[in-house]
Image: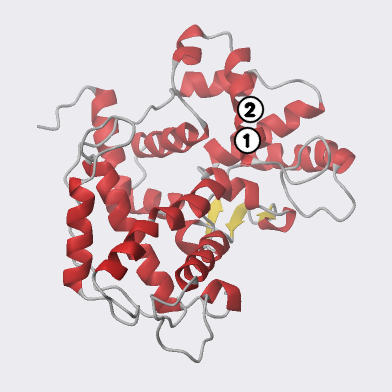
């Protein structure tokens, strides 16, 4: 999919008639990174990622200067490889140790994403042939069905409880990513078809997510009795805060943490979990119920089915089945 139709001139970072970027031109790399930052926001990345990924690339531009690369039209493989070797020799400012494989993989993914940005906006490309480092799959925390029920039961009986249930139904019932729920507008909740339209998703992969009768009821009650009483007149956001404006990811996380405390379940309270745990949980529960891995991948909006297959490992562990 081309992004030219939705990306502003500033996001492209250069006059579109120019087919290359002279890296040595003073301040130009900064404009390119500003454009990359805006593009990341447009295609649905969370604020911390939108700010962090361009900053992570600043050393890459200094490396290009050292290698006397004067254009982004087609950065050769050798330059990319030599930059990656410098990353492998770099030590963490926190631990003093060499960068972990997972951190190096993050740099590779950022380079690939930046190359996509350059190609989609007609500014150039990077010849990347780097292979991801082998890393151990981090263990994902998964809540039991009983713990999910406890969270729902902890919802307040008043108007704010309707919003709490709507949040749980979005992030557990529909398995949304944090920013996907924040970005939803009222017209994205298709009650008659029982679908949520995710327009602004990670990697710009829009999708429809089905929901069950219980989630439909939660959404209807929230819209009728909670949102309608506090939303500003022109507000289009589905989830809103107490001031009637679009809710922030921080505020949603606080709601979730408050629900955990209200469960009075010390084991649940001791777990290091967040909103994304609800997404892990619904994926695992769907797999345990017999849903096919490809359907779950579509439900979650994964670009690669390999991302979904990590839940197979989780399910086997929960069932006490060896994967050796």
- Quadrant of the snapshot with the N terminus: bottom left
**In this figure, which residue is indicated by the disc labeled 2?**
254
Q: Residue at x 17, y 58 (%)?
A: 131
**Residue 221: in sight, yes or no?**
yes
Q: Contact, CB < 8 Å: mark 1 with mark 2? A: yes
Q: How is the image coloured?
A: secondary structure
Q: Nearer the viewer, residue 197 or 236?
A: 236
Disc 2 packing (10 Å; few <14; some 14–19; many ≥20): some
On screen, residue 290 above or below 191: above
Q: Nearer the viewer, residue 258 or 314?
A: 258
Side of 14 relative to 229 (left or right): left
Secondary structure under the numbered disc 2 in the rendered image: helix
Q: Is residue 117 above or below residue 303?
A: below
Q: Position of residue 46 (x, y in %)?
A: 54, 49
Give the percent coordinates (x, y) of residue 92: 29, 37
Q: Name the disc covering residue 26, or none.
A: none
Q: Residues within 10 Å of mark 1 (few under 14, many from 20)?
A: few
Q: Does residue 25 sit above or below 268 in this rendering? A: below
The location of residue 245, given as percent across then percent down, is 79, 45
**Tag count:** 2
Q: Say which element carries label 1.
A: helix
Which residue in the structure is indicated by mark 1? 250
Quarter occupied by residue 285: top left
78 left or right of 42? left
């Amino acid at each position: 999919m081309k992004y030219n139709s939705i990306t502003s001139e500033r996001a492209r970072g250069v006059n579109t008639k120019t087919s290359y970027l002279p890296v040595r031109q003073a301040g130009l790399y900064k404009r390119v990174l500003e454009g990359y930052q805006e593009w990341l926001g447009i295609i649905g990345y969370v604020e911390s990622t939108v700010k962090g990924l361009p900053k992570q690339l600043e050393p890459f531009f200094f490396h290009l200067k050292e290698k006397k690369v004067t254009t982004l039209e087609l950065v050769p493989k050798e330059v990319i490889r030599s930059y990656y070797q410098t990353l492998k020799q770099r030590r963490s400012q926190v631990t003093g140790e060499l960068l972990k494989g997972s951190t190096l993989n993050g740099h590779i993914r950022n380079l690939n994403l930046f190359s996509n940005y350059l190609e989609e906006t007609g500014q150039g490309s990077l010849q990347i042939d780097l292979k991801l480092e082998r890393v151990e799959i981090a263990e994902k925390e998964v809540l039991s069905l009983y713990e999910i029920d406890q969270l729902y039961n902890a919802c307040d009986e008043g108007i704010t409880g309707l919003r709490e249930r709507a949040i749980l139904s979005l992030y557990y019932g529909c398995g949304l990513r944090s920013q996907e729920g924040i970005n939803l507008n009222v017209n994205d909740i298709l009650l008659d078809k029982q679908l949520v339209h995710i327009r602004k998703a990670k990697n710009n992969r829009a999708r429809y997510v089905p929901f069950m009768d219980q989630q439909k009821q939660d959404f209807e009650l929230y819209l009728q009795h909670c949102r309608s009483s506090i939303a500003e007149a022109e507000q289009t956001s589905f989830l809103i805060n107490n001031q009637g404006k679009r809710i922030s990811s921080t505020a949603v996380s606080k709601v979730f943490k408050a629900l955990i405390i209200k469960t009075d379940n010390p084991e649940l309270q001791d777990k290091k979990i967040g909103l994304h745990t609800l997404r892990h949980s619904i994926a695992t529960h769907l797999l345990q119920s017999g849903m096919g891995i490809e359907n779950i991948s579509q439900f979650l909006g994964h670009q690669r089915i390999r991302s979904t297959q990590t839940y197979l490992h989780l399910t086997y562990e929960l069932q006490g089945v060896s994967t050796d």
